[in-house]
Amino acid sequence: MMAKQTISLTVNAQSAVVEVEPGKTLLRVLREDMGLTSAKEGCGQGDCGSCVVVMDDESVNSCLVLAAQAQGSQVVTLEGLEQNGQLHPLQEHFAKEWGFQCGYCTSGMLMSCYDLLNHNSQPSREEITEAISGNLCRCTNYRAIIDAVEIAAAELHKSEQD
Amino acid sequence: MYGNEYIAPKDIGEALDVLERHPNAKIIAGGTDLLVQMRHRMIEPELIVDVGRLPFDSILVDHEKVTIGSGVSHAQIGNSDLLQEHFPILVQASQLVGGPSIRNRSTLGGNLMNASPAADTIPPLLAYDAEVVIAGKNGSRTLPLSQFYTGYRQTKLAAGEILEAVQLPLPSASTTAHFIKHGNRRSLYIAVLNVAVRISLSASGAVENSRIALGCVGPTVFLAKAAEAQLQGKLIDEPTILAAAQCAEEESTPISDLRASGDYRSNIVAVLVRRALTEAAGELLGKGH
């Protein structure tokens, strides 16, 4: 017998209330109950990073968080990066630098990089590499991803100083 | 997804009450091990008790010890200047757990209670003479971590108890430690072998105290006591280090698994213990001993 639980959380700056089965993961609630399908299930056990979202200002594997554990938290998914029809510089430069091919890992990659830039506005290539070390890409190349993050970071840093 | 009930107690009293009523409940903290085990149906708990809202998330220091709450994440440990100053190999090991988004969620208490022989933080904690603080209905009790594990994934935590914190005595200035996590990748890997050593020297330069903790070469992480005895009272030179490394290999009982064969692990134990002791000895010499 499973009693549903009511969870309130903020997703992409909008408050939401969802009824969930207690054992349902945050990933499945985002995808199935909220229609936010950017985060993907790859391995389902924390090895691939395609489910990464930002929760309370930290990157997390949403397949390894119960929705009930997200009670009261602030979640940002890839859908929340675009502002007023404008792509986030990370998204823009992933596209320009060919930082993706099939796209399956891209959402998780972007969210890991978004979390990085929130805490470190001028990361070195080593720091970018470390930040995406929990995100597997099997078809494009990591160098293009790292290039894209470097360019986006420089652009964001410049616009903050202007 | 998982057929179970969930409760997040607001304080320790409520948590202990729930656990008393539901002795088969499973505790969740970060969830990075538990949800994987549930996904593979290795465990199917009826009730999940989330300890994430309990006040176990701080790192406190007094004149003789540091207390790390069981809910402190590996990311918090990895970023702690206080821990870096006194317990650098615990910080190093924490930075090697999973990847960044795992470390944001996974907790020190979770790493200890998952009780894997490949747990990254247990060898450094054993090397630093850690004690575990366990909360129960009759108050808290403290136990040396070296006595906590009773077999493969078995601990002395009784039903109804919660791991509350880990305490580490502040090491003396003449102490140095070295940790090696040996594996097949640079991130998101489970160790093939973990080695943590700590050495303190007396004023004469002889080994006063040593710890050699080994992971992945037995049913639990353990202290290689015969290897430690080889070092006791001796000057830490190459023959002494080789003798200790040989003992460590003899004390190991590795199995073969998908990460490495038992034979390989046996060989690499002696190599990595020698390397860790040599590095630690070099650091002590650098400190002027």
Image (tube, grey):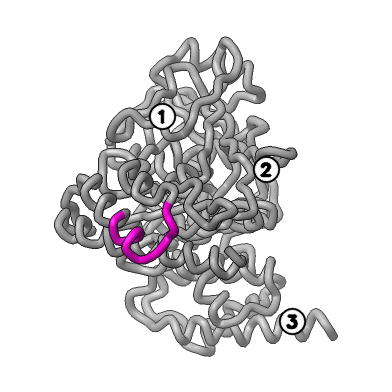
In the image, what residue type sits under mark 3? His
Q: Regarding mark 2 in the picture, which secondary structure is present there?
A: strand
Name above or below for residue B158 compared with residue B147.
above
Q: Residue at x 47, y 86 (%)?
A: A144
Can you tell which mark lies on residue A157? 3
Q: Regarding mark 1 in the picture, which secondary structure is present there?
A: helix
Which residue is the extreme one toward the right? A162
Q: Nearer the viewer, residue B289 or B41?
A: B289
Q: Which residue is drawn at 47% across and 49% down?
A: B124
Q: Which of A80 and B121 is in front in this view?
A: B121
Can you tell which mark lies on residue B59? 2
Q: Nearer the viewer, residue B77 or A99?
A: B77
Between disc 1 and disc 3, the foreground one is 1
Name above or below for residue A87 compared with residue B160.
below
Q: What stretch is highlighted in magenta?
A: B234-243
In the image, what residue type sits under mark 1? Gln
Can you tell which mark lies on residue B51? none
Q: Which residue is drawn at 37% across and 26% down?
A: B45
